[in-house]
Amino acid sequence: MPFVRRAVLSALVAGACWASLPAQEKPAVNPALFSELRWRAIGPHRASRTVAAAGHPLRPFTFYMAQVNGGVWKTTDAGRTWNPIFDDQPTGSIGVIAVAPSNPDVIYVGSGEGLHRPDLSTGNGVYKSADAGKTWTHLGLTDAQQIPSLAVDPRNPDRVFVAALGHPYGPNEERGIFRSTDGGRTFQKVLYKDENTGGNDVDIDPSNPDVVYATMWEERQGPWENAVWAGTGGGISARGGGGDGSLSGVGFALGFGATFGQERRQSYASARKIRTIRRIEIPLARWRWFAMMLRVQIPHSSPR
């Protein structure tokens, strides 16, 4: 018994001494270990611009990518082979791919490249796959024509936000930020300025998915190849409660574009609970910058 007591006492003393030692820092990774790594093209080798690519951490060898006029492609072996999975659909112009964080089988695709340029291709709305790209369902927003951004709630694959840029060559109503809470069966326009201003980007705060950020862009392509390509009324606004028009926050970011023949700089900002928009004009030779980022607080509950 004395032996057992001495053994226990010795163990306690040793543990106390070990606990008093300073924590050892992990050795820094020597950058030289990566010096021989080189980027290499892994395909698919199909000519065109590419703006869309997505994957999921639970499937580290599976990725999706899409050219702006080449449909959606998928690899399950980290790019060694690629297969087209969108060829049966009536459009091949893709602006964004989003894989639901909570379900890697759920994929949303926004058609229409969303890159404003003299030669571009338009799409016909949003598509969804619930089986990792085997089959697709057309969800709507057909007249949006260009969808450069999608955001899926990390908690709920049925809650998705869509940035619809709209017609590149003229005005239309189906543009702005749309939200679906039923997996795309229905969409509600939760942020809209006018028929000339579209949604350019949308993101969900991963630490608080009820906070959504979005940018709006007023832009028009002319048939004379980019004579004028920046608008003046981008503005900034914020909406809460599912898009009821009440201001609930303020955000600020900078989008910029060239404007030929005009010399002014414009900024737009709105403050919390202030329902007016303040515009500041500063002479700036032949360039116009406009701020268009917004912070939207939208509860997770169903819309009213």
Image (tube, grey):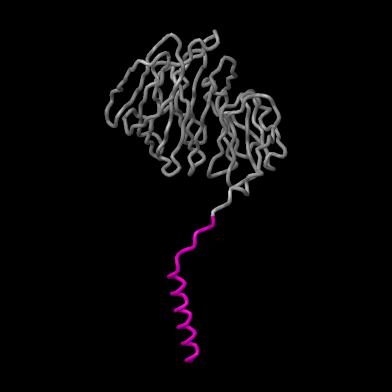
Residue 251 falls in image quadrant: top left
116 lies above or below 150: above
Seen at 47% across and 29% down, the residue is: 201
Q: Main secondary structure of the magenta part?
A: helix
Magenta residue check for 25: yes
122 lies above or below 81: above
Q: Position of residue 55 (x, y in %)?
A: 59, 40
Q: Position of residue 148 (x, y in %)?
A: 53, 27
Q: Which of 104 and 285 lies nearest the eye of the viewer?
A: 285
Q: Position of residue 271 (x, y in %)?
A: 29, 29
Seen at 44% across and 79% down, the residue is: 13
Q: Which of 202 and 142 lies nearest the eye of the viewer?
A: 202
Q: Residue furthest right?
A: 81
From the viewer's perspective, is 61 left or right of 161? Answer: right
Q: Position of residue 154 (x, y in %)?
A: 49, 42
Q: Residue furthest bottom?
A: 1
From the viewer's perspective, is 251 left or right of 78? Answer: left
Q: Which quarter shows the C terminus?
A: top left
Q: Which residues are magenta?
A: 1-27
105 lies above or below 198: below
Let me know if residue 2 appears in the view. Answer: yes
